[in-house]
Amino acid sequence: MDTVSANTVRRAAEAFDLGGRVLDVEPLGRGLINDTFLVTTDHGRAVLQCINRRAFPRPELIMQNLRALLDHAARHAQRALKLPDIHRTHAGSDFLVDADGAFWRALTYIENTRSIERIAHPQQAQAIGRVLGQFHALTHDLDPARLHTTRQRFHDTPWYFERLVTVLAGSAVNRDHADLRSCLEFAEARANRVVVLEQARRRGELQTHVIHGDPKVENVLFDAASGAAVSLIDLDTVQPGLLHYDLGDCLRSACNPAGETPSDPAQARFDLDLCRALLGGYFAETRGLLTDADLHYLPDAIRLIAFELGLRFLTDHLQGDTYFKVAWRGHNLHRARTQFELTASIEAQDGAIRALVAELARG
Ligand code: GN1
Ligand code: MG
């Protein structure tokens, strides 16, 4: 997204009823899609976001989903999980479209928390698993038909694969570039392994639920004092989907201690101890929620969502970095290589992952 001027951001902040006068606005977080700001008022703090319309062509659907989720959560008052609330504009709307057509929304800032970029120890993985489990337990009785799809085909791996093929066909790719060539070969060798989840969904083996869509490590908030995970933020992709998309994404993010941009992509690996801790936390919150079929396809999801993200980064690199924010030309290729290293590590441990899921599922 184009960078917005400080004046534009401030004017947007002032359009919302944040309970006080705006004193300061500064960039917040490391998201790859939206522009996020921390607004300080004389009464507290709030999060202001400009939603990326390239990623979300109809951002008002995000806000309708968020309302539906918050209304649902309000009926589960005993829940431990904290969710950000919506600040309305002074005109009473859940969002603002400014004079340039930019889409803004403001959310409550959850105080006394911090986010982390990478996991440092298994307790953090367990805490993340718990929070994802709490989210799934909370949304299990929210009918997915009540939610919009905010981003079509968001975790449809075969579709991402087809898109890569189309982009390749339409551009002169330099296969002399060793990193690019090895990425393409890695992807092409997996062409017929991408359909597993979508096929199971189409056959009716897996059911659609309300999912988060993007439960990566950085979207979990930890209590600053106790270190417990207390909140799952970034609710833009809360929509109908498979629980596998969430579990796969959470595990590929949390169980790779090297993170999404290590100094060398070869550092990426899937850590089974972190996986054990995360799934232990998740199952403790969701006992009985996953079916036998869900469990059967869980190892495939771990492999697929890491691979899928690699495909997405690679395609964006080939398209000239139009989707994910990058720090340098080549960043998306570096990220793709990292996710593919991770995928290879997951594949190499397939037997152990399957045994682990079976063991934990038995309780
Ligand atoms: C994007 O916006 P952010 O940073 O929370 C992306 C996710 C990826 C993630 C990888 C809407 O999330 O799907 O997994 O980057 N979100 C969207 O870091 O595409
Ligand atoms: Mg996101």
Image: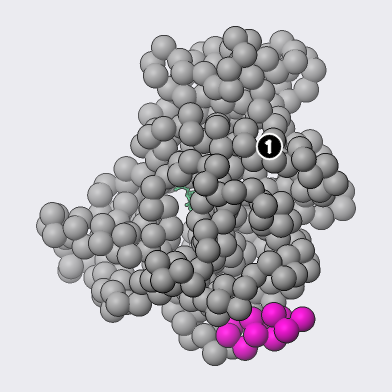
Q: Magenta span has 191?
A: no
Q: Is residue 341 visible?
A: no
Q: Which residue is mark 1?
A: 70
> Total marks drawn?
1
Which residue occupies the foreground of this view, 51 or 79?
79
Color encoding of the figure: one colour
Residue at 62% of width from left, 14% of height from top? 92
Which residue occupies the foreground of this view, 93 or 203?
203
Residue at 81% of width from left, 48% of height from top? 79
Residue 342: where, in percent of width, then height? 48, 72
Q: Magenta span has 354?
A: yes
**Type of amino acid at the residue the image marks with label 1:** Leu
Relative height, residue 59 to residue 192 (above, below): above
Residue at 63% of width from left, 10% of height from top? 90
Report the span colored magenta.
Answer: 353-363
Please, what is the dominant secondary structure of the magenta stretch?
helix
Relative height, residue 226 to residue 205 (above, below): above
User: Viewed as shown, does residue 29 lie left or right of 288?
Assistant: left
Which residue occupies the foreground of this view, 89 or 148?
148
Relative height, residue 2 to residue 230 (above, below): above
